Each structure stands twice: as structure tokens, then as C-alpha cells.
Amino acid sequence: MISDPPTPQRIADLIRTSFPLTPVPSIPEIQLHKANPQSGLWRFAEADRAFDSPYWAYHWGGGLALARYVLDHPETVASRRVIDLGAGSGLVAIAAALSGATQVTAADIDRYAVIATDLNAAANGVTITTLHDDLTTGLPPEANIILVGDLFYDEALAERVTTFLDRCLAAGIAVLIGDPWRAHLPRSRLALLAEYPGHDFGSGNATEPKTNAVFAFRPA
């Protein structure tokens, strides 16, 4: 029988114990708590009914590309207020903080992702505000730029995110997207900024080389 859900402190302890800090592929400046074959994800599912697919525990191509781009082009976020939408492990948010953003908020609907982001930010010596919330259902946030790493893997989610990003553009907020050319990407709205070779957990084969891209999101 599943017991009461673990406390945030218990989740943090489990992540520290089961998800070792490792350098990020193609981004050695950053280390993250990530899953390996010994992580025992089933233990989390047994302990918490709310434990879902741990997307935050793996490297997704869009996040890898966007973080690399931000680190290579710090002027993109320097002295700006940044939102990392669907932050996962906080990789893109950490890259923004390292690149001189004045304020970085990492938002995700998964409480495990939020706790992992807090741990990862501390491990990389940066300050990030974490938010356990779905920003796509509300008004544009107080920000200068929104960074979106790999949120177009599902059709319904892609439509909701695109609608939200349109509200953000109308409010004068810039938007950058990292994505490995998924099927539901709004390609007609994008301007390609960079491409990087790499891997992508979301492809179903994390070892298969992919091309991960970074785009500017444009008005319709």
C-alpha cells in the first residue's frame, strides 16, 4: 500500500542519493542530478501516487540546445528577467543565471522537477526562483524573455503553449524555443538561430544522434 506522499525534504534526499550529479552532455559548465540504471525510479512511484513520468531526470534535446545557445550568447539574457517554461531539471534556467540574467524563474507542473531544479541550482552556485505552476493558463508573466525547452512533443500541449506564447509576444516579451524538430513544432512561426548535434531522450532512443535547434518565436 502506498503511504503518505514524501515531504519535499524526503524527495530532495532521494534525488541526492539516487540521481548523481553528472556533467551535462555538450555543456560541461553545468552538472545536474540525473537518472542512471541504478536510480530505481520504481521506488518513487511506490512512495507517491503523484509521481509521473520523470521527464526532469533525463536530457531532452531542446533543453540541451537552448542551454548551449544561451551560454554561447549571454547577451540573449544578460540583465534581463527570464522565465524557463517547463523547466524540468532547470538546465536552461541555470544557463541563464550563469549568463548574467538579473532574475530567473523556473516553472514546472511537476513538484519533483521543482525540487530537482532547486538542488541543481545550488550545485551550480546560482540563484533561481522555482515555481510549481502551469503558467500557460494565465496572463503573461513579468519577464523580458521566455525560454522554452522541448514543450512540443504532444499536440494538445503544443497548442496550449503556442497560445500562451502569443499572449507573451503581445505583451512585448521575447521568446526563444529549443527543440529537436518535433512533429508539433509551430514551424511557420519560427526563425532558426542555431543547430547543434546531440542526443535526445524524447526520441525514444537516447543514444541516437539528433540535430537539436534553437528558434526565435515570431508573431503570426
Image: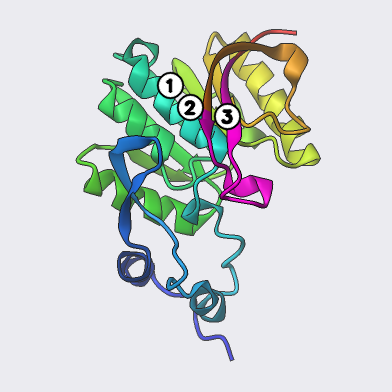
- Quadrant of the frame with the N terminus: bottom right
On residue 212, the disc is 3
Dot 3 or dot 2: first in sequence order is 2
Q: Secondary structure at mark 3?
A: strand
- Quadrant of the frame with the C terminus: top right
Instruction: Give percent across and percent down for residue 136.
Output: 63, 34
Q: Which residue is mark 2?
A: 66
Mark 2 residue type: Leu
CB atoms of marks 1 and 2 within 8 Å: yes
Q: Is residue 135 visible?
A: no
CB atoms of marks 3 and 2 within 8 Å: no
Q: Secondary structure at mark 1?
A: helix
Dot 3 or dot 1: first in sequence order is 1
Magenta stretch: give its range: 197-215
Total tally of numbered discs in the picture: 3
CA neighbours of label 1 inside 10 A, class few (<14), some (14 to 19), many (20+): many
